[in-house]
Amino acid sequence: MEHTEIEKIKCLIIGSGPAGYTAAIYAARADLKPIIYQGLQPGGQLTITTEVENFPGYPEGTQGPEMMEDLKKQAERFGTEIRWGTATSVDFSSFPHRVTIDENKVVEANTVIIATGASAKWLGLPSEQKLNGFGVSACAVCDGFFFRGQDVAIVGAGDTAAEEASYLSKLCRKVYMIVRRDEMRASKAMQHRVTNTPNIEILYNHTTVEILGEQGVTGVKVLNTLNNKERILDITGFFVAIGHEPNSKVFKPYLEMDKNGYIITRLDSTHTNIEGVFACGDVQDHIYRQAVTAAGSGCMAAIDAERFLANKGLH
Ligand code: NDP
């Protein structure tokens, strides 16, 4: 590693979704001079969605990417410094905390707000990995366009899968929805929408055996778990919408997490087990996972950070 002077920061925010930007707005207004490292997906998961209709304050709804652009501008307006870069390792063994960015820059922060969110889960099939980006995708809104007029399949049975199946049904000729149980987890309203869309066929009690194709997807082999019969669906696009996992690996040596890797925060706060390290948004929330709850916990993290610094006489 190149030897450079270590930058000292009062408040470092890692991640730039609704949690990170809201933390930044509050921290900047409290004069903590926050610096955000945006991470691998600047703007977070909302940048790969379209309509957001449930964020309060937008009576007609808004577009995810636009909302994130607005949040970014609001954070910048109060003096947040927004930088490209991802935290690649941390050292929380002593105070102040050390965070390495992109494996080459080390910053020393009195407070660290972790807002790294969550990422899409995959089935784990070798064929899925092989064809990822060649017909296999975890984001219908990003990639559905490429399959206009074609037949596609989507696996999953939660709100995301239902929402994405519905989105795809408007672009594609036919959408197979592969559901592993005999019912969906999605809300009743979303279930109603997909079951009433003529070009969506729901395959209950089905699992994915293999995605077929060499240079691109040509089909998917599915198994009916009730009668143990396999069948091939002729499709060119395969979408995975089976939930998310928290982006917390880099903090694993230091922070308490649950068995799925969600960072554990102290009751009614964003404090982690390490003094001066706070977590907010989807990286610590496997229950609500909404933009508005992420934003709310981002606000809490900034307030917790400000109080921590004040108590330490550092602000
Ligand atoms: P969920 O965890 O709610 O659902 C994941 C789905 O994937 C489940 O149906 C699960 O099946 C299925 N699944 C998991 N692993 C596999 C596997 N290996 N093979 C096949 N199927 C699998 O994730 P979502 O991303 O759908 O939703 C996350 C949260 O976000 C939820 O709280 C949801 O309500 C919310 N949300 C809200 C929206 C809105 O309000 N507009 C839109 C999108 C999401 P099983 O049911 O059998 O466990």
Image (tube, rainbow, N blue to C red):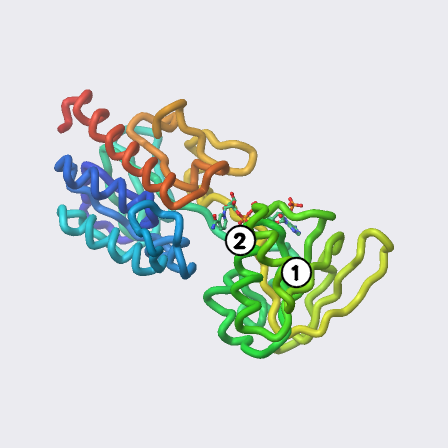
Of 164 and 281, nearer the camera is: 164
Q: Is residue 275 left or right of residue 157?
A: left
User: Which residue shows up at 21% across the image and 46% down it?
Assistant: 35
Q: Label 2, label 1: how many angstroms apart (C-alpha)?
A: 12 Å
Q: Is residue 163 left or right of residue 253?
A: right
Q: Is residue 314 above or below residue 119?
A: above
Q: Is ligand 1 closer than 8 angstroms to the Cβ of mark 2?
A: yes
| Residue 174, position as x, y percentages in the image | 64, 71
Residue 177, label in figure: 1
Residue 160, label in figure: 2
**Does label 2 or label 1 sit earlier along the sequence?**
2
> Which three-letter amino acid code belongs to the residue tagged 2?
Thr
Label 2 SS: helix
Of 58 and 161, nearer the camera is: 58
Q: Residues within 10 Å of mark 1 (few under 14, many from 20)?
A: many
User: Which residue shows up at 62% across the image and 51% down it?
Assistant: 157
Of 290 and 128, nearer the camera is: 290
For this orientation, the residue located farthest to the top is 311
> Which three-letter amino acid code belongs to the residue tagged 1?
Met
Q: Is residue 21 left or right of residue 197?
A: left
Q: Is residue 248 left or right of residue 27?
A: right
